[in-house]
Image: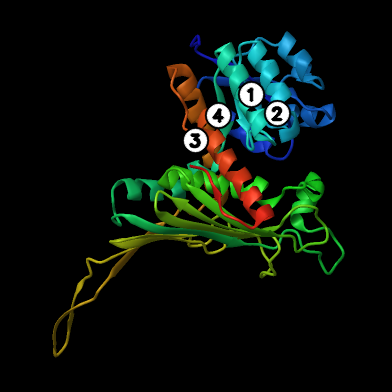
Amino acid sequence: MRSPSVLRGALLGTGTVSYHHLIAWQRVPGVEIVALYNRTVDKARQRAAQFGIDQTHVYGDYEQLLAEEPLDFVDIATAPSIHRTQVEAAAARGLAVLCQKPLAPTLEDAEGMIATCEQAGVLLSVNENWRWRAWYRTIKRMLDEHRIGTVRYVRIAAHHNLTLPRPDGELPGLFRSQAYTRSMPKLILLEWGIHLIDTLRMLLGEIDWVYCRTDRASPLCTGEDRAVLVLDMGGVMADIDISWASIRPEGPPSLLEDVVVEGDEGTIALVPNQGYGDLIAITDLRGADLRREGVERARTPTRTTALPAHDGDLAAAYQASYDAAQRHFIDCLRAGLEPETIATDNLKTLRSLFAAYESAEQNAVVFLT
Protein backbone atom coordinates (compact mmCIF):
# COMPACT_ATOMS: atom_id res chain seq x y z
CA MET A 1 0.00 0.00 0.00
CA ARG A 2 1.51 3.30 -1.06
CA SER A 3 1.22 6.07 1.50
CA PRO A 4 0.46 9.36 -0.27
CA SER A 5 -0.13 12.48 1.74
CA VAL A 6 -3.83 12.32 0.86
CA LEU A 7 -5.76 9.06 0.49
CA ARG A 8 -8.61 9.30 -2.02
CA GLY A 9 -11.81 7.45 -1.19
CA ALA A 10 -15.29 6.87 -2.58
CA LEU A 11 -18.47 6.27 -0.60
CA LEU A 12 -20.87 3.69 -2.03
CA GLY A 13 -24.34 4.28 -0.59
CA THR A 14 -25.77 7.62 0.53
CA GLY A 15 -28.57 6.60 2.88
CA THR A 16 -29.13 7.86 6.42
CA VAL A 17 -25.88 6.53 7.89
CA SER A 18 -23.79 8.13 5.12
CA TYR A 19 -24.13 11.51 6.83
CA HIS A 20 -22.12 10.25 9.81
CA HIS A 21 -19.58 8.57 7.53
CA LEU A 22 -18.97 11.78 5.59
CA ILE A 23 -18.68 13.90 8.73
CA ALA A 24 -16.09 11.44 10.04
CA TRP A 25 -14.11 11.43 6.79
CA GLN A 26 -13.88 15.22 6.97
CA ARG A 27 -12.24 14.84 10.38
CA VAL A 28 -9.68 12.18 9.46
CA PRO A 29 -6.40 13.88 8.48
CA GLY A 30 -5.07 13.09 5.03
CA VAL A 31 -8.32 11.70 3.61
CA GLU A 32 -10.60 13.05 0.88
CA ILE A 33 -13.86 11.52 -0.30
CA VAL A 34 -13.80 12.36 -3.99
CA ALA A 35 -16.79 10.41 -5.35
CA LEU A 36 -20.22 9.15 -4.32
CA TYR A 37 -22.46 6.38 -5.60
CA ASN A 38 -26.10 5.64 -4.95
CA ARG A 39 -28.60 3.61 -6.95
CA THR A 40 -30.98 6.57 -6.65
CA VAL A 41 -28.55 9.11 -7.99
CA ASP A 42 -30.54 12.13 -6.77
CA LYS A 43 -29.82 11.08 -3.18
CA ALA A 44 -26.12 11.00 -3.97
CA ARG A 45 -26.34 14.44 -5.55
CA GLN A 46 -27.96 15.81 -2.41
CA ARG A 47 -25.18 14.39 -0.24
CA ALA A 48 -22.55 15.75 -2.64
CA ALA A 49 -24.03 19.24 -2.39
CA GLN A 50 -24.20 18.95 1.40
CA PHE A 51 -20.51 18.02 1.67
CA GLY A 52 -18.98 20.02 -1.16
CA ILE A 53 -18.24 17.08 -3.47
CA ASP A 54 -18.09 17.90 -7.19
CA GLN A 55 -21.32 16.81 -8.90
CA THR A 56 -19.31 15.44 -11.83
CA HIS A 57 -18.05 12.75 -9.43
CA VAL A 58 -21.51 11.47 -8.49
CA TYR A 59 -22.58 8.14 -9.98
CA GLY A 60 -25.61 5.90 -10.28
CA ASP A 61 -23.36 2.99 -11.34
CA TYR A 62 -20.63 1.89 -8.93
CA GLU A 63 -18.77 -0.06 -11.64
CA GLN A 64 -18.44 3.16 -13.63
CA LEU A 65 -17.22 4.98 -10.52
CA LEU A 66 -14.54 2.36 -9.87
CA ALA A 67 -13.45 2.43 -13.50
CA GLU A 68 -13.17 6.22 -13.79
CA GLU A 69 -11.99 7.41 -10.35
CA PRO A 70 -8.36 7.07 -9.17
CA LEU A 71 -8.86 5.79 -5.62
CA ASP A 72 -7.02 4.30 -2.65
CA PHE A 73 -10.06 2.88 -0.80
CA VAL A 74 -13.83 2.58 -0.83
CA ASP A 75 -16.29 2.92 2.03
CA ILE A 76 -19.29 0.66 1.39
CA ALA A 77 -22.52 1.71 3.14
CA THR A 78 -25.09 -0.09 0.99
CA ALA A 79 -27.50 -2.93 1.75
CA PRO A 80 -25.86 -6.19 2.94
CA SER A 81 -27.30 -8.10 -0.01
CA ILE A 82 -24.97 -6.29 -2.43
CA HIS A 83 -21.87 -6.03 -0.23
CA ARG A 84 -20.21 -9.03 -1.81
CA THR A 85 -20.42 -7.82 -5.42
CA GLN A 86 -19.19 -4.34 -4.47
CA VAL A 87 -16.37 -5.59 -2.23
CA GLU A 88 -15.15 -7.96 -4.92
CA ALA A 89 -15.36 -5.24 -7.59
CA ALA A 90 -13.21 -2.96 -5.44
CA ALA A 91 -10.73 -5.74 -4.66
CA ALA A 92 -10.35 -6.47 -8.39
CA ARG A 93 -9.02 -2.91 -8.75
CA GLY A 94 -6.64 -3.25 -5.81
CA LEU A 95 -8.61 -0.99 -3.47
CA ALA A 96 -8.81 -1.33 0.30
CA VAL A 97 -12.38 -1.67 1.60
CA LEU A 98 -14.18 -0.50 4.71
CA CYS A 99 -17.57 -2.25 4.66
CA GLN A 100 -20.62 -1.43 6.76
CA LYS A 101 -21.94 -4.10 9.12
CA PRO A 102 -23.25 -6.71 8.73
CA LEU A 103 -20.42 -7.72 6.41
CA ALA A 104 -22.71 -10.15 4.56
CA PRO A 105 -26.14 -11.79 4.88
CA THR A 106 -24.58 -15.28 4.96
CA LEU A 107 -21.36 -16.85 6.21
CA GLU A 108 -20.70 -18.19 2.72
CA ASP A 109 -20.74 -14.66 1.28
CA ALA A 110 -18.52 -13.33 4.08
CA GLU A 111 -15.97 -16.09 3.61
CA GLY A 112 -15.99 -15.52 -0.15
CA MET A 113 -15.37 -11.80 0.28
CA ILE A 114 -12.48 -12.45 2.64
CA ALA A 115 -10.91 -14.98 0.26
CA THR A 116 -11.20 -12.57 -2.68
CA CYS A 117 -9.56 -9.71 -0.78
CA GLU A 118 -6.79 -11.95 0.53
CA GLN A 119 -6.05 -13.15 -3.01
CA ALA A 120 -6.00 -9.55 -4.24
CA GLY A 121 -3.77 -8.48 -1.34
CA VAL A 122 -6.13 -5.72 -0.19
CA LEU A 123 -7.42 -4.83 3.25
CA LEU A 124 -11.04 -5.67 4.08
CA SER A 125 -12.32 -4.25 7.36
CA VAL A 126 -15.79 -3.81 8.85
CA ASN A 127 -17.11 -0.40 9.85
CA GLU A 128 -18.27 -1.50 13.33
CA ASN A 129 -18.47 1.69 15.35
CA TRP A 130 -20.23 0.41 18.48
CA ARG A 131 -17.03 -0.84 20.10
CA TRP A 132 -15.61 2.66 19.58
CA ARG A 133 -18.26 4.37 21.69
CA ALA A 134 -16.47 6.19 24.49
CA TRP A 135 -18.29 4.42 27.33
CA TYR A 136 -17.39 0.95 26.05
CA ARG A 137 -13.75 1.97 25.55
CA THR A 138 -13.72 3.21 29.16
CA ILE A 139 -15.16 -0.08 30.43
CA LYS A 140 -12.58 -1.99 28.36
CA ARG A 141 -9.76 0.04 29.91
CA MET A 142 -11.11 -0.65 33.40
CA LEU A 143 -11.25 -4.37 32.71
CA ASP A 144 -7.70 -4.34 31.33
CA GLU A 145 -6.63 -2.59 34.55
CA HIS A 146 -8.37 -5.34 36.61
CA ARG A 147 -10.45 -2.74 38.43
CA ILE A 148 -13.03 -5.37 39.44
CA GLY A 149 -10.86 -8.48 39.49
CA THR A 150 -11.92 -11.53 37.50
CA VAL A 151 -15.11 -10.96 35.49
CA ARG A 152 -17.92 -13.42 36.29
CA TYR A 153 -21.03 -11.99 34.63
CA VAL A 154 -22.06 -9.37 32.05
CA ARG A 155 -25.49 -8.10 31.08
CA ILE A 156 -26.36 -5.68 28.26
CA ALA A 157 -30.01 -4.65 28.09
CA ALA A 158 -32.19 -2.00 26.46
CA HIS A 159 -35.88 -1.87 25.58
CA HIS A 160 -37.39 0.73 23.23
CA ASN A 161 -40.61 1.32 21.31
CA LEU A 162 -39.63 1.52 17.65
CA THR A 163 -41.86 -1.07 15.95
CA LEU A 164 -45.27 -1.11 17.68
CA PRO A 165 -48.27 0.49 15.93
CA ARG A 166 -48.91 4.08 17.01
CA PRO A 167 -52.33 5.29 18.23
CA ASP A 168 -52.27 8.09 15.65
CA GLY A 169 -51.89 5.60 12.80
CA GLU A 170 -48.45 6.86 11.80
CA LEU A 171 -45.65 4.38 11.26
CA PRO A 172 -43.34 3.90 14.27
CA GLY A 173 -39.94 5.53 14.22
CA LEU A 174 -37.83 2.69 12.83
CA PHE A 175 -40.09 2.17 9.81
CA ARG A 176 -40.26 5.88 9.03
CA SER A 177 -36.48 6.31 9.02
CA GLN A 178 -35.58 2.91 7.50
CA ALA A 179 -38.55 1.63 5.52
CA TYR A 180 -36.69 -1.45 4.26
CA THR A 181 -36.53 -2.90 7.79
CA ARG A 182 -40.26 -3.78 7.69
CA SER A 183 -39.65 -6.64 5.25
CA MET A 184 -36.37 -7.94 6.68
CA PRO A 185 -36.74 -11.62 7.73
CA LYS A 186 -33.97 -11.07 10.28
CA LEU A 187 -34.33 -7.81 12.15
CA ILE A 188 -33.29 -6.80 15.65
CA LEU A 189 -30.38 -9.23 15.99
CA LEU A 190 -29.02 -8.43 12.54
CA GLU A 191 -29.46 -4.67 12.90
CA TRP A 192 -28.68 -4.14 16.61
CA GLY A 193 -27.74 -7.36 18.32
CA ILE A 194 -24.70 -7.80 16.07
CA HIS A 195 -23.24 -4.59 17.53
CA LEU A 196 -23.65 -5.89 21.06
CA ILE A 197 -22.19 -9.31 20.25
CA ASP A 198 -19.15 -7.58 18.74
CA THR A 199 -18.84 -5.29 21.77
CA LEU A 200 -18.95 -8.28 24.13
CA ARG A 201 -16.18 -9.92 22.12
CA MET A 202 -14.12 -6.74 22.41
CA LEU A 203 -14.63 -6.68 26.18
CA LEU A 204 -14.32 -10.38 27.05
CA GLY A 205 -13.00 -12.45 24.16
CA GLU A 206 -14.55 -15.33 22.27
CA ILE A 207 -17.96 -16.96 22.63
CA ASP A 208 -18.09 -20.68 23.38
CA TRP A 209 -21.84 -21.24 23.08
CA VAL A 210 -25.08 -19.32 22.71
CA TYR A 211 -28.72 -19.88 23.58
CA CYS A 212 -31.25 -17.46 22.09
CA ARG A 213 -34.98 -16.81 22.12
CA THR A 214 -36.65 -14.32 19.76
CA ASP A 215 -40.14 -12.90 19.38
CA ARG A 216 -42.06 -10.67 16.98
CA ALA A 217 -44.52 -8.47 18.85
CA SER A 218 -45.35 -5.94 16.13
CA PRO A 219 -47.67 -6.85 13.22
CA LEU A 220 -45.90 -4.24 11.10
CA CYS A 221 -42.65 -6.15 10.53
CA THR A 222 -41.56 -9.53 9.23
CA GLY A 223 -38.52 -10.15 11.41
CA GLU A 224 -38.03 -10.44 15.16
CA ASP A 225 -38.24 -7.29 17.29
CA ARG A 226 -37.30 -8.87 20.64
CA ALA A 227 -34.38 -11.12 21.54
CA VAL A 228 -32.70 -12.57 24.61
CA LEU A 229 -29.31 -14.28 24.35
CA VAL A 230 -27.34 -16.21 26.97
CA LEU A 231 -23.68 -16.71 26.09
CA ASP A 232 -20.71 -18.47 27.63
CA MET A 233 -17.45 -16.61 27.09
CA GLY A 234 -14.59 -18.61 28.52
CA GLY A 235 -16.58 -19.37 31.66
CA VAL A 236 -18.03 -15.85 31.95
CA MET A 237 -21.83 -15.83 31.80
CA ALA A 238 -23.19 -13.05 29.59
CA ASP A 239 -26.63 -12.08 28.41
CA ILE A 240 -28.09 -9.64 25.92
CA ASP A 241 -31.72 -8.54 26.38
CA ILE A 242 -33.05 -6.20 23.68
CA SER A 243 -36.43 -5.06 22.43
CA TRP A 244 -37.83 -2.62 19.89
CA ALA A 245 -41.40 -3.52 20.89
CA SER A 246 -41.72 -2.28 24.48
CA ILE A 247 -44.21 0.34 25.62
CA ARG A 248 -41.98 3.05 27.05
CA PRO A 249 -42.32 6.72 28.02
CA GLU A 250 -42.37 9.13 25.10
CA GLY A 251 -39.11 10.80 24.15
CA PRO A 252 -35.94 9.90 22.28
CA PRO A 253 -34.38 6.63 23.43
CA SER A 254 -30.98 6.76 25.07
CA LEU A 255 -28.05 5.79 22.88
CA LEU A 256 -26.60 3.88 25.83
CA GLU A 257 -27.51 0.37 26.83
CA ASP A 258 -27.95 -0.59 30.49
CA VAL A 259 -24.78 -2.59 31.24
CA VAL A 260 -23.57 -4.48 34.31
CA VAL A 261 -20.15 -6.13 34.50
CA GLU A 262 -19.66 -8.09 37.72
CA GLY A 263 -16.26 -9.26 38.96
CA ASP A 264 -15.08 -10.97 42.12
CA GLU A 265 -13.76 -7.64 43.43
CA GLY A 266 -16.43 -5.22 42.23
CA THR A 267 -18.99 -4.18 39.62
CA ILE A 268 -18.95 -1.73 36.73
CA ALA A 269 -22.34 -0.36 35.66
CA LEU A 270 -23.22 1.76 32.66
CA VAL A 271 -26.28 3.73 33.75
CA PRO A 272 -28.20 5.53 30.98
CA ASN A 273 -30.57 8.34 31.80
CA GLN A 274 -32.24 9.18 28.49
CA GLY A 275 -29.18 11.13 27.40
CA TYR A 276 -28.86 13.20 30.60
CA GLY A 277 -26.46 12.30 33.36
CA ASP A 278 -25.27 9.07 31.74
CA LEU A 279 -22.81 7.49 34.17
CA ILE A 280 -20.26 4.74 34.58
CA ALA A 281 -20.35 3.60 38.22
CA ILE A 282 -17.72 1.42 39.88
CA THR A 283 -18.54 -0.37 43.11
CA ASP A 284 -15.74 -2.20 44.88
CA LEU A 285 -15.05 -3.92 48.18
CA ARG A 286 -12.49 -1.49 49.51
CA GLY A 287 -15.14 0.38 51.43
CA ALA A 288 -14.71 3.66 53.27
CA ASP A 289 -14.20 4.63 56.91
CA LEU A 290 -17.05 6.61 58.43
CA ARG A 291 -17.01 8.61 61.70
CA ARG A 292 -20.31 9.42 63.33
CA GLU A 293 -20.88 11.52 66.39
CA GLY A 294 -20.88 9.31 69.47
CA VAL A 295 -20.15 6.19 67.44
CA GLU A 296 -16.83 4.50 66.98
CA ARG A 297 -15.36 4.12 63.52
CA ALA A 298 -17.45 1.94 61.21
CA ARG A 299 -16.57 0.55 57.82
CA THR A 300 -19.01 0.30 54.93
CA PRO A 301 -18.69 -2.94 52.98
CA THR A 302 -18.55 -1.24 49.58
CA ARG A 303 -17.66 2.03 47.93
CA THR A 304 -19.20 3.43 44.74
CA THR A 305 -17.62 6.07 42.55
CA ALA A 306 -19.04 7.40 39.31
CA LEU A 307 -17.82 9.33 36.29
CA PRO A 308 -19.63 10.74 33.25
CA ALA A 309 -20.03 8.26 30.41
CA HIS A 310 -19.37 11.08 27.92
CA ASP A 311 -18.85 14.83 27.92
CA GLY A 312 -22.56 15.63 28.03
CA ASP A 313 -23.11 16.18 24.31
CA LEU A 314 -24.63 12.83 23.33
CA ALA A 315 -24.92 13.68 19.63
CA ALA A 316 -21.22 14.56 19.55
CA ALA A 317 -20.35 11.37 21.43
CA TYR A 318 -22.35 9.35 18.91
CA GLN A 319 -20.54 10.97 15.99
CA ALA A 320 -17.20 10.47 17.72
CA SER A 321 -17.60 6.69 17.48
CA TYR A 322 -17.73 6.97 13.68
CA ASP A 323 -14.75 9.32 13.75
CA ALA A 324 -12.70 6.87 15.81
CA ALA A 325 -13.63 3.80 13.76
CA GLN A 326 -12.77 5.42 10.44
CA ARG A 327 -9.58 7.02 11.73
CA HIS A 328 -8.45 3.61 13.02
CA PHE A 329 -9.04 2.10 9.57
CA ILE A 330 -6.92 4.79 7.90
CA ASP A 331 -4.15 4.60 10.50
CA CYS A 332 -3.91 0.84 9.97
CA LEU A 333 -4.10 1.19 6.19
CA ARG A 334 -1.17 3.61 6.19
CA ALA A 335 0.89 1.54 8.64
CA GLY A 336 0.12 -1.86 7.07
CA LEU A 337 -1.44 -3.11 10.31
CA GLU A 338 -4.58 -5.17 10.95
CA PRO A 339 -7.52 -3.10 12.27
CA GLU A 340 -9.45 -4.34 15.29
CA THR A 341 -12.37 -5.05 13.00
CA ILE A 342 -10.51 -6.70 10.14
CA ALA A 343 -12.96 -8.96 8.32
CA THR A 344 -11.30 -12.18 9.51
CA ASP A 345 -11.98 -11.12 13.10
CA ASN A 346 -15.48 -9.81 12.40
CA LEU A 347 -16.28 -13.20 10.89
CA LYS A 348 -16.33 -14.49 14.49
CA THR A 349 -19.02 -11.94 15.32
CA LEU A 350 -21.03 -13.06 12.28
CA ARG A 351 -20.71 -16.72 13.26
CA SER A 352 -22.00 -15.90 16.73
CA LEU A 353 -24.92 -13.96 15.23
CA PHE A 354 -25.97 -16.80 12.94
CA ALA A 355 -25.53 -19.26 15.82
CA ALA A 356 -28.04 -17.16 17.78
CA TYR A 357 -30.56 -17.43 14.96
CA GLU A 358 -29.95 -21.19 14.74
CA SER A 359 -30.44 -21.49 18.49
CA ALA A 360 -33.73 -19.57 18.36
CA GLU A 361 -35.00 -21.74 15.53
CA GLN A 362 -34.05 -25.00 17.24
CA ASN A 363 -34.65 -23.89 20.85
CA ALA A 364 -31.25 -25.36 21.69
CA VAL A 365 -27.75 -24.35 22.73
CA VAL A 366 -25.40 -23.91 19.76
CA PHE A 367 -21.69 -24.43 20.36
CA LEU A 368 -19.09 -22.36 18.55
CA THR A 369 -15.97 -24.03 19.96
Distance between the alpha carbons at the discs numbered 1 and 2: 9 Å
Q: Earlier in the sequence, mark 1 or mark 2?
A: 2
Q: Which mark is residue 83?
A: 2
- The answer to whether the residue labelled 1 contacts the one labelled 4, judged by CB atoms less than 8 Å apart, is yes
Q: Secondary structure at mark 1?
A: helix
Q: Earlier in the sequence, mark 2 or mark 3?
A: 2
The three-letter amino acid code for the residue at tag 3 is Ala
Q: Is residue 340 visible?
A: yes
Q: Secondary structure at mark 2?
A: helix
- The answer to whether the residue labelled 1 contacts the one labelled 2, judged by CB atoms less than 8 Å apart, is yes
Nearer to us of marks 1 and 3 is: 1
Residue at the (75%, 64%) spot, across then down: 217
Q: Residues within 10 Å of mark 2 (few under 14, many from 20)?
A: many
Residue with the mark numbered 4: 343
Residue 119: percent from the left, percent from the top?
Answer: 58, 13
Q: Earlier in the sequence, mark 1 or mark 4?
A: 1
- In the figure, is residue 362 to the left or right of 200? right
Q: Earlier in the sequence, mark 1 or mark 3?
A: 1
Asked whether 111 or 226 is in front, the reply is 111
Residue with the mark numbered 3: 324
- In the figure, is residue 60 to the left or right of 280? right
